Every structure is written in C-alpha cells, then in structure tokens.
Image: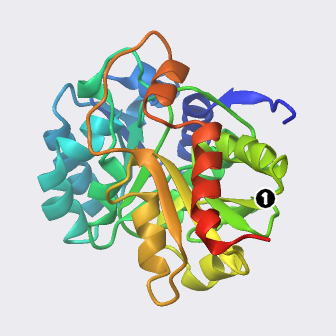
Amino acid sequence: MEKKQEKNLRTAYGLALLELARSNPNVVALDADLCGSTQSIQIENNLPSQFFEMGIGEANMVSAAAGLALCGKIPFVHSFAVFAAGRPFDQIRQGVCLPNLNVKIVGSSAGLSDFGDGATHQSFEDMALMRVLPHMTVLAPVDAVETPKVVRAAAVIEGPVYIRLNRNDLPIMTEDDAPFEVGKPLVLAKGKDVVLCVNGVTAGMGLKAREILEKRDISARVVNFSTIKPLDEVAVRSALSGARALVTAEEHSVVGGLGSAILECLSKAPLPVVRVGIADRYGQSAHNYDQLLEHYDLTAEVIAKAAEEVLDPLALS
C-alpha cells in the first residue's frame, strides 16, 4: 500500500474550531485544564473572551456549558475522551441530553492513542456511553482533512454532539472537496466478497488488510464510518450491498461501539459479521502507540484473518 501523508487530528481540530469561533462569536470553548493537549488553546490564545478554563472539574464544566447553551451560546467542551464521556455522564444525561441542549463534547486522545498514560487515560467505552443517550450525535473523523468538516457539521446540529479524536498523526484518507454527511458511510476502496467496516485509526489498517486479502484471492471493500450515531440505514445498506460478509474494526470495546451500531442497523437483513476491537478489558501503558495496537489485536493482519474466517464457511469460490 502506498504510504499516505499523515497529519494530526488534534491540530486540525484546534484550527477548525478557531476558524469557526472567529466567524461566529456565539461559539465558545470550555476546557478541563488540558487545553494544550485538546487544542482548545487556539481559542484561549486568539479569542480569550470566548474561552473558559474550568479546571479539573468535568461535571461542573458540562453543567456550565448547559447554562451557556441556554443563553444562546454554542459551547464546545474539551477533555480527554475517557474524562469527557465518563466523569460527567450524569450531567450529560440529565443536563444536556434530556433537555436536548446545544452542547458539543469533544473527547480527545481517544482509544489507545494516549499510549503512555495507561488504563486510566485510555477510553474504550466512550462511544458506547454517548451513543446510548437520546438526542446525542456521535462522530469520529477519519483524518485531519475530514476533522474541520466534522466541526462545522457539529456546529449546525441543534442538539448535543460527541466528537471523538485520536491523539496521533493519522494517514489522510479523504479529499479536500469530499462532502461530509452525518450518518452516511464513505467507501474508501471497492470490493465484492467482504466489507471491512472501519473508522479512525482502523481505516488505514483496513486498506492494508485489503491488500493482504487481495493476495489471497479475496476481494475486500473498505467502508469508513465517521458517524456512529445516527446511521442512515439506506446509505449503510447501499454501502454494504452485495457482500457475503462483514468485518468491523474499531479502536473501542467490541461492546457498544461501531460493530454494535452496524449490527443494529442490519438487524432486519443480517449478514455474517466478525467484530475486531478491544476485548472486554482495560488498557495499559507502553513505549509507543503501535506496540499497544498490536498487543490488543488491532492490526491489518488481524482484520485480514477475520475476513478469511468469516468467509471460509461460505465456500467462497
């Protein structure tokens, strides 16, 4: 596979938020003492009147954001994903989602991408927590090109949105002029035998797995899901049509994330599905990101093997 240019999603996010805030003074940023990491520091440094440093108090930060939303502001709330989704869950449920307030929650350093800080800082359950809440939209941009489009889309949605961001540089998968539509998957590569459903860091793995499978006479389609909720069922069925089986791959628990969302979407017309993701376990620290991805069986080789296994009993010709 030709190596793609890599760019950092957090950097792209911070610049996109700054551009949005400059064009709309109602956009404000709140942060839980992590603005340098989440890149809300772009607002603090350039538009300080639109920035609120809330300290290490995510629950209070979300409640304050709810109040700002009631005053007509569009608050973007920032922390690491494990803290943005987990610590203030009750405030998100009761104070934001129940009244359907216009609060955007940005979970940075998601999944294993904060490789050095171990289990306490690695979020495998954030998408599951957020997608179960009524009114919540859950988005996970695939690259630094799509990230600004996700930020703009989140800003125009009237209601709560959760944006999941990887900490590291990821390959560019999308074109500058490619539209981003909430709920609709994007076909990254064509194929007919099996569909590899991916998002975030697993998108690059899916394309590499496709090359592995091609050498084994298996044609794999790679479909990216930057929306976890809501999913457009018609668009999903169209993107997956004609395949004999599916493999889902995500940097998230296999419980409640992308795989679960797709299975729910296809419940009326089931296909054989294998889910690749993080088993029912916690994280740990490591010297680098790739070391953890391999340890938790999140590699192109594992995805390719899953595709072979799900196709084998179907007597692929």
Is 41 positioned to the left or the right of 96 in the image?
right
Q: Residue at x 26, y 34 (%)?
A: 282
- Quadrant for residue 185, please give it: bottom right
- Quadrant for residue 235, please give it: bottom right
Residue 189, horizontal then vertical, whole percent: 80, 57
100 shown above or below 223: below
Q: Nearer the viewer, residue 233 or 259?
A: 259
Is 76 positioned to the left or the right of 314 in the image?
left
Residue 179, horizontal then vertical, whole percent: 74, 62
Per the image, the residue denoted by label 1 is 218
Label 1 element class? loop
234 shown above or below 194: below
> Does any portion of residue 179 appear in the rendered image?
yes
Identify the amino acid type marked 1.
Ile
Locate the C terminus and report the quarter of the image it occupies.
Answer: bottom right
Locate the N terminus and report the quarter of the image it occupies.
Answer: top right
> Does any portion of residue 143 appear in the rendered image?
no
Which residue occupies the extreme bottom position in the image?
268
Q: Residues within 10 Å of mark 1 (few under 14, many from 20)?
A: many
What is the tally of numbered marks visible in this picture? 1
Q: Residue at x 53, y 62 (%)?
A: 227
Residue 144, horizontal then vertical, whole percent: 67, 38
Q: Residue at x 61, y 76 (%)?
A: 236
Q: Nearer the viewer, residue 232 or 19?
A: 232
